[in-house]
Image (spheres, rainbow, N blue to C red):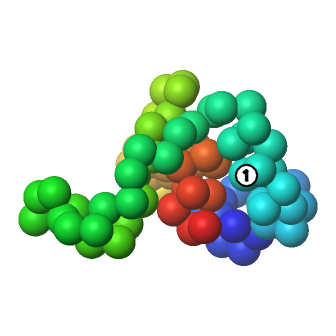
Amino acid sequence: MGHAYFPKELPRVFATAGFGNNVDDIIADWRSANLFSQMCDLKVPVKKTTKAGAYKYKLKAWADPEIISTPKRGYERRSLHITHPIPQSLLVD
């Protein structure tokens, strides 16, 4: 989480090293605040798209990605999507 979480197009002032160094404590705080709940440990895939042994989490809040539009060339734009930190950190964990 501390490396390459943000797109490289963002200025260097946006950094995630502190988040990456403390992600275990941050997840523990989120868990104690009940921001997400673990639904189940899937021993057998429910659907073809579900992986066996995977965890499913239910978030208490909406977690849409943040979309930032940057110029590409001419009048073209590139959309950068920054995922919400809760589902992204649970995925990495």
Q: Amino acid at mark 1?
A: Ile
Compare residues 92 and 8 and report the one nearer the observer.
Answer: 92
Whether 24 is drawn above or below 71: the answer is below
Q: Is residue 61 left or right of residue 13?
A: left
Q: Quadrant of residue 90?
A: bottom right
Whether 81 is drawn above or below 54: the answer is above
Quarter in which the N terminus is drawn: bottom right
Q: Mark 1 = which residue?
A: 27
Quarter in which the C terminus is drawn: bottom right
Compare residues 86 and 56 and report the one nearer the observer.
Answer: 56
Whether 31 is drawn above or below 24: the answer is above
Residue 31, how many percent across, how many down? 69, 42
Q: Residue at x 53, y 39 (%)?
A: 37
Residue 83, how many percent across, how many down? 54, 48
In this rendering, the count of numbered labels is: 1
Q: Quadrant of residue 6?
A: bottom right
Q: Is residue 6 left or right of residue 46?
A: right
Q: Residue at x 20, y 67 (%)?
A: 44
Q: Residue at x 28, y 68 (%)?
A: 43
Q: Is residue 68 visible?
A: no
Residue at the extreme top of the image, as rendered: 61
Residue 40, how many percent across, how many down? 39, 51
- Characterize the local packing of mark 1: few (<14), some (14-19) or many (20 or more) Cα atoms within 10 angstroms: some
Q: Is residue 42 visible?
A: yes
Residue 78, how many percent across, how many down? 44, 51
Q: Residue at x 39, y 60 (%)?
A: 41
Secondary structure of the residue carrying tag 1 is: helix
Compare residues 35 and 83 and report the one nearer the observer.
Answer: 35
